[in-house]
């Protein structure tokens, strides 16, 4: 499907609209009705098309933006372009995919992490925290882990949902990956009680940091 037009793709996305899928997606704050498996199948047929990806993004349609992320070339974006896109990505799934599928593969990811981390917009800041969390196990050199724990200790309890979730993930990763900070990470989680009562399906790990840290460390020790 090379050189497919924007109109053709938007028509196909419209045809994929499913009320049941929309109902499920909207429970997670995602305002579209396209089954993600079918969206990925469409992306596989389209293959990489950077120009079309930019056109899809410009429509502001959530399904179109998700498709754009799947068919773009992550390294083709400049830093300023990704900064604008992230600030436009208010839908949770769009932000999550943009950070994980594009920004993390882009040569400007570290610069963007620094720009976003302390942004006054909590949604933007959550992306900075997500990129920081990515570094905790893979490239912690240069990260101030005690300083991150200081910020989490003071700000996580009252942070907006998406930022709170990102901070909590960072807290858990620090506790899991860095034994010298594990006791403090668990203590912070126990005192703040963030996500303590989060409903967790059987056989899944709780996002409550003390339980999360303890369970993953147990599994690692058992290997």
Image: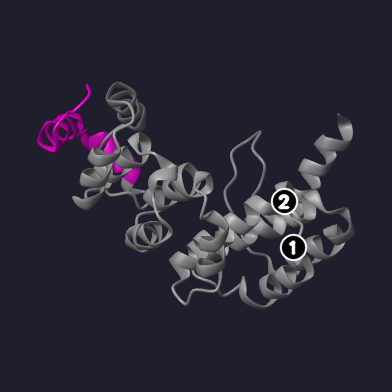
**Lateral position of residue 37 relative to residue 106, left or right:** left
Which region shows up in magenta? 1-25
Asked if labels 1 and 2 touch by Cβ distance under 8 angstroms, the answer is yes
**Looking at the picture, how far across and down is residue 166, in whole percent?**
57, 59
Residue carrying label 2: 139
Residue 47 lies within the magenta run = no
**Lateral position of residue 93 relative to residue 159, left or right:** left
> Hey, which quadrant is residue 86 in on the image?
bottom left
Residue carrying label 1: 142
**Looking at the picture, how far across and down is residue 143, in whole percent?**
73, 63
Tell which of 143 and 42 is nearer to you: 143
Where is the C terminus found, in terms of image quarters? top right
**Looking at the picture, how far across and down is residue 213, in whole percent?**
77, 50
Residue 212 in sight from this viewpoint: no
Q: Residues within 10 Å of mark 2 (few under 14, many from 20)?
A: few
Residue plotted at (20% across, 45% down) = 55
């Amino acid at each position: 499907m090379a050189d497919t037009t924007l109109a053709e793709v938007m028509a196909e996305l419209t045809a994929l609209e499913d009320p049941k899928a929309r109902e499920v997606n909207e429970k997670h704050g995602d305002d579209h009705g396209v089954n993600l498996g079918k969206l990925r199948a469409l992306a596989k047929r389209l293959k990489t098309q950077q120009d079309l990806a930019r056109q899809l993004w410009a429509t502001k349609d959530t399904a179109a933006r998700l498709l754009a992320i799947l068919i773009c070339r992550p390294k083709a974006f400049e830093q300023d372009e990704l900064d604008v896109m992230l600030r436009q990505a208010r839908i949770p799934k769009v932000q999550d995919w943009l950070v994980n599928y594009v920004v993390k593969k882009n040569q400007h990811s570290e610069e963007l992490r620094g720009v976003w981390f302390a942004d006054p917009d909590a949604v933007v800041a959550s992306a900075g925290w997500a990129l920081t969390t990515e570094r905790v196990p893979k490239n912690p050199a240069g990260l101030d882990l005690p300083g991150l724990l200081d910020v989490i200790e003071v700000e996580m309890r009252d942070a907006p949902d998406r930022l709170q979730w990102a901070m909590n993930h960072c807290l858990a990763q620090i506790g899991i990956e860095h034994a010298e900070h594990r006791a403090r990470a668990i203590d912070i989680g126990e005192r703040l009680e963030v996500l303590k009562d989060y409903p967790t399906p059987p056989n899944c790990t709780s996002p409550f940091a003390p339980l999360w840290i303890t369970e993953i460390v147990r599994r690692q020790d058992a290997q």
